[in-house]
Image (tube, rainbow, N blue to C red):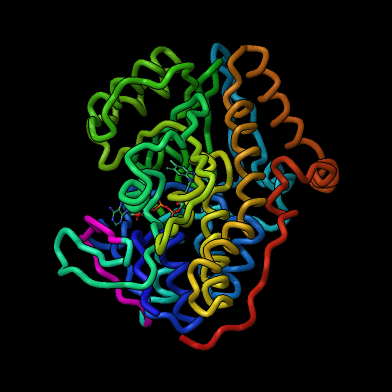
Amino acid sequence: MRVLISGASIAGPVLAYWLTRHGFDVTVVERAPQLRKTGGHAVDLFRPAMEISEKMGVLPRIEALVTGTDTGTICREGTRRPVRIDITKAVGAVSDRHVEIMRDDLSEAYYDAGRDDVEYIFGDSITAISPEAEVTFEHAPPRGFDVVVGADGLHSNVRRLVFGEDAGHTQFLGGYLAVESVPKTLARDGEMNSHIGAGRLAAIYTARPLEDARALFMFRSKEELEYHYRDVVRQMELLREAFAGMHETVDGWLDELGRAPTFYFDSITQLQLDTWSRGRVTLVGDAGYCPGPAVGGSTSIAVLGAYILAGELAQANGDYTRAFAAYEREMSEPVRRSRAMARGIAKGLIPNSRAGVWALTRGAQLISMLPASLTKAAAKLNTKGVRLYDSMHYREYSTPVAG
Ligand SMILES: Cc1cc2nc3c(=O)[nH]c(=O)nc-3n(C[C@H](O)[C@H](O)[C@H](O)COP(=O)(O)OP(=O)(O)OC[C@H]3O[C@@H](n4cnc5c(N)ncnc54)[C@H](O)[C@@H]3O)c2cc1C
C-alpha cells in the first residue's frame, strides 16, 4: 500500500517511520528545500511521546540534545528586581517524564530513524488530490497513491485542498506568539529570562546546541489583528507596538528585529475540526488538531497521533475507511483534553491585570522554594490540567515487522 505524507517536521517523519515498520511504502513531500534546521523553537515532549520515541530507538539522542533550561528570572513590569525561579521544579510539577528540545533537533532525530526506508522529496508541494488519490505536484510528475496524509502543520496545504480554504474550524485563543533569532551573547545557557506585564510576556533563552538565542514574545489581543501571514514587516511593526515601553532589555531584543535571520509570528489559534478524514485523505498533528502553538503540548499530540494512525492502518490491513474511523476514535479523547488544557493555559499564561501578573510571579517563586516532592505531590491531584499528558492512556500496537 502506497502512502503519501505531506510535511517532514514532527508528525510526518514519525508516521513515516511507523508505517514502514508495518510494511507500507511511504513517500514524504516537504515544501522546504531540505530538513528545516533554522528558526525552530523549544518544544516539550511529554510521557506518551517519550515512550513512543523510546520504541523508535531515538530517546538517547533526544536526551542528549535537551535544551537544559533549568533556571530563570521573571521581572514584573514596573519593578527593577527580577525574582529567580527554578524551572526544573515547575516542570517537575507538570510531568514526571518530560524533556524540552529544539523542534529542529527533534525533527532530525525522527527523520534519521526512518530515512533509509522512506522516499523523501524536498522542495515540492502537492497541488491537487483526486478522490482516487491521484496526486499532482508543483514539480514532480503526477503519481497515484492509496492514502494521502496531511502532516503539514497549522496552515496545512492538504487540509486546504480537501476541506476548503477556511471551513470555519479555527478558534482564536486571544493571543499572539512571536519568536525571533537574536545573538547568543544576549542570553545565558540554561537560563530563561522573562519580563511580564499585564497582557504581555517577553523572554529570552539559549541552549547548548544553539548558535543563537531566541527571544519569545506572547501578547493578548481581544480582536484578531489585521495583517497578511506573509507580511513580515507588518508583523514586526505589530510586535514593536505591543511591547513598546516594557523594559530597556526588551527594547534591545526588539532592536534586533531588522537583523534577525529568522522570525516567526502567528496567532494562538486552535483548530476544531469535528473530523479530520475525508475519503482517502486524513490529517495528523497540527494539521488536524493543533490545540494552539505553545499552549497545549501539541508536539506530544502530533507524535501520539502519528503512532496511532500507523497502528490503525496496520490493524485494518490498509482498509483506510476502517482505519481512519478507529484513528479518530482513539485520538478523540487526547485531542479533546489537549484543547481544553490549551484554552486554560492561553488564559492563564499571560494575565491581563497587574494583580494577575503579581500572582503568577509569586506562584512561580513559591514553587521554586518548595521541595520538589511537595510540588509534585500537589500537582498529582490534578490530572485534568497540566498533568494530563502523564495521565494519558493510549492504545499500543503489536511489534511491527522490520522496515
Ligand atoms: C513558536 C512556537 C512555539 C512552540 N512551542 C511549543 C512547546 O513549547 N511545546 C509543544 O509541545 N509544542 C510547541 N509548539 C508547537 C510545535 O512546534 C508543533 O505542535 C509541532 O511541531 C507539530 O508538528 P507537525 O509535524 O504537526 O507540524 P509542523 O511542525 O508545523 O510541521 C509542518 C511541516 O509541513 C511542512 N509544510 C508546510 N506546508 C507544506 C506544503 N505545502 N507541502 C509540503 N510540506 C509543507 C513545513 O515546512 C513543516 O516542515 C510551538 C510552535 C511554535 C510555532
Query: Residue 345: where, in percent of width, then height?
Result: 62, 33
Question: Which residues fall within the magenta stretch?
Answer: 117-130
Q: Identify the residue at horizontal 55%, vertical 52% (top origin).
A: 100
Task: Say how many tags the image has.
Answer: 0
Q: Identify the residue at horizontal 37%, vertical 37% (top origin).
A: 166
The answer to whether residue 374 of the structure is visible from this angle is: no
Q: Relative to residue 267, is residue 58 depicted above or below?
A: below
120 part of magenta stretch: yes
Quarter where residue 37 is shown: bottom left
Q: Is residue 183 left or right of residue 312?
A: left
User: For the C terminus, which image quadrant?
Assistant: bottom left
User: For the N terminus, which image quadrant?
Assistant: bottom left
Query: Residue 135: where, in percent of width, then height?
Result: 25, 64
262 part of magenta stretch: no
Could you say which is closer to the camera, residue 204 or residue 328? Answer: 328
Could you say which is closer to the camera, residue 120 or residue 106? Answer: 120
Q: Relative to residue 65, is residue 255 depicted above or below?
A: above
Query: Residue 9: where, in percent of width, then height?
Result: 39, 58
The answer to whether residue 184 of the structure is visible from this angle is: yes
Quarter where residue 109 is shown: bottom left
Q: Identify the residue at horizontal 72%, vertical 60% (top origin).
A: 393
Q: Identify the residue at horizontal 36%, vertical 23% (top origin).
A: 239
Q: Is residue 104 left or right of residue 381?
A: left
Quarter where residue 359 is shown: top right
Query: Residue 65: where, in percent of width, then height?
Result: 50, 61
Q: Relative to residue 50, is residue 293 depicted above or below?
A: above
